[in-house]
Image: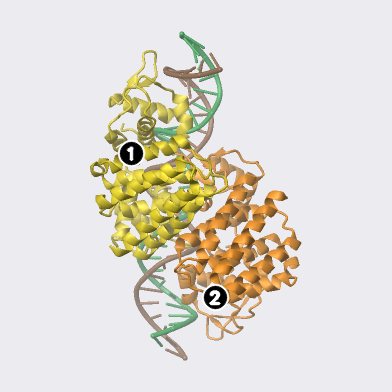
Chain colours: A yellow, B orange, C brown, D green
Amino acid sequence: MPPTQLTRQVAARIVDYIRAEQVAAGTRLVERTLADQLRVSRSPVRNALRLLADSGAVAEAERGGYTVLDADLPLDLAEDAEDGADEAVYLAIASDRLDGALPDRITESALVRQYGLTPAQLNRILRRASSEGWIERLPGYGWEFRPTLTSEQSYADSYRFRLTIEPAAILEPTFVLDRQAIEQVRDQQQRLADGAIHELDNVELFNINHVFHETIAECSRNGFFIEALRRVDNLRRLVEYRRRLPRDRGVVRCREHVEIADLLLAGRQAEAAERMREHLSSVTTEKTVS
Amino acid sequence: MPPTQLTRQVAARIVDYIRAEQVAAGTRLVERTLADQLRVSRSPVRNALRLLADSGAVAEAERGGYTVLDADLPLDLAEDAEDGADEAVYLAIASDRLDGALPDRITESALVRQYGLTPAQLNRILRRASSEGWIERLPGYGWEFRPTLTSEQSYADSYRFRLTIEPAAILEPTFVLDRQAIEQVRDQQQRLADGAIHELDNVELFNINHVFHETIAECSRNGFFIEALRRVDNLRRLVEYRRRLPRDRGVVRCREHVEIADLLLAGRQAEAAERMREHLSSVTTEKTVS
DNA sequence: CTTGGTATTTTGCCAACAAGTAATACCAAC
DNA sequence: GTTGGTATTACTTGTTGGCAAAATACCAAG
């Protein structure tokens, strides 16, 4: 019996957690704590830990339970686990749509047939796609793809929008610097600028940059700014995965990121907001030229 | 056999359309046109027209088809039609949640039991609620209400967010004034300020004001601004329906709306944006005081 | 009191069929 | 070419029951 969808997902999250927090080897992985953190019950956590133990990612503790084996787990572990199915189909549909292989309107059963899904699987995927804003249920039967990000215009629009909200988020009165988080993403960007950028693929590069911007926005403590940014990035992700991202420009962007983070850490918010504005508008012009 | 959910909905939209556009009596209601406009096929349009004809809202034309009887249809018609079921349950769940009658997490079957729904009905409702951003599916079983708008803080946050995006939308380079639309909402606001405001209930008042702000944002021609505003308002709606809206303050707000519209019509966008900023921030301070 | 182990309850998915209705194509009339 | 009428196709919903697995409660050990 193959591990369940949720089990794989939970396993991937656990790996992410160990890697991101650099949890020391030997630390106990407490079921209840993980369950609370991942918003599931202990059952899938238990199964996920068993799965990870079988593949040698975590160690079984002496009197039951599991402990961390190594903070630097191979990245593949999370990806392998995640590749349950949903994610792949989700990206496939998005990709096919961007390629123009899917019509503007489509019925659920057509999708079920074309991608060989069960109704519930498709239900999950459509739920996600519609919550991310690129597909919409019609009043009657069928779904309609929304024109988001398919055109160059809407791509530019997304940057204009970020140009408005990201600097504004920094200047919000509720803004409180999360020094630790900012330092972490700052160092990550520094490493990228120092050359690590050439070793990453599009997905990882996008995710790191996305986390950088989101971490800053989160300091605004205003859920509307945070969620608005998140929504834009969720859409952007679908396109960026498919683009060629020139790495030389990427180095410049990372340096700008470092600079913005340094300004924030120095408490110079107004300047940071201004740099952020310049940073985002430079990307805009760059894109429209190419 | 009672009319179907979709039929009622389409009927309500047709009534909305006739009222909003003030379609002259005697005009033919063309099935295909309506179907395209409402993004459904002719079948439900036909059923809806039959329904409206039976209740005397539209007239049967001589050689088949239907014509408009009177541009000023009673508002109840749309509401009666809409009250099919979904909408009522949707608002009931939102209301119960705001009252604290529903726990933070809840399962689908609990909702099915509590509100006497079929799975597909609940599916539709959850889809909508999650796309509007106030409920979220957990990784395992169950759903979680998001803390949006339940607290005074997040209510204030929503205004801070609008304070950022609405003036910015006016200043977007892609902004193109839709003179006709702006004039229409301007006049509507003028009528409100002249006293009509005292004859409206919360729902209608909210909708009119919401349309005003959205019409302006739409001139930005940037879907991200438009959608972000729409999302905030969809959430706000759930709360505002339940508040007491003091009408005297409302009059002042309507006057400000008229003023903003006039500035836009005069092509003075920068000033309009500034007035919009003041307008929104005055509401914020007013709320935090009360 | 915290943690891991175990048992019980409940949930949501699956499958397949029936039924009603939305989408679509076609036709006739003006 | 439009428009309304009609027929056909194909889609989604509503069933039902069975089942794997997620949630939950309980227990024992340290």
Residue B267 numbered tag: 2
In the visual, does B249 lie left or right of A195? right
* Nearest to the observer: residue A156 or residue B41: A156
* Nearest to the observer: residue B210 or residue A182: A182
SS at mark 2? Answer: loop
Label 1 marks which chain's residue?
A
* Nearest to the observer: residue C3 or residue A256: A256
Residue A82 numbered tag: 1
SS at mark 1? Answer: helix
Q: Residue at x 64, y 46 (%)?
A: B152
The outermost residue toward the left is A198
Amino acid carrying label 2: it is Gly
Q: Residue at x 32, y 60 (%)?
A: A287
Q: Residue at x 64, y 68 (%)?
A: B257
Q: Position of residue B29 (x, y in %)?
A: 53, 79
Quadrant placement of the N terminus of chain A: top left
Q: In which quarter of the view is residue B266 placed?
A: bottom right
**Same chain? Circles 1 and 2:** no
Label 2 marks which chain's residue?
B
* Nearest to the observer: residue D23 or residue B168: B168
Residue B1 in view, yes or no: yes
Tell me the mark number nearer the camera, choosing from 1 and 2.
2
Amino acid carrying label 1: it is Glu
Residue A83 in view, yes or no: no
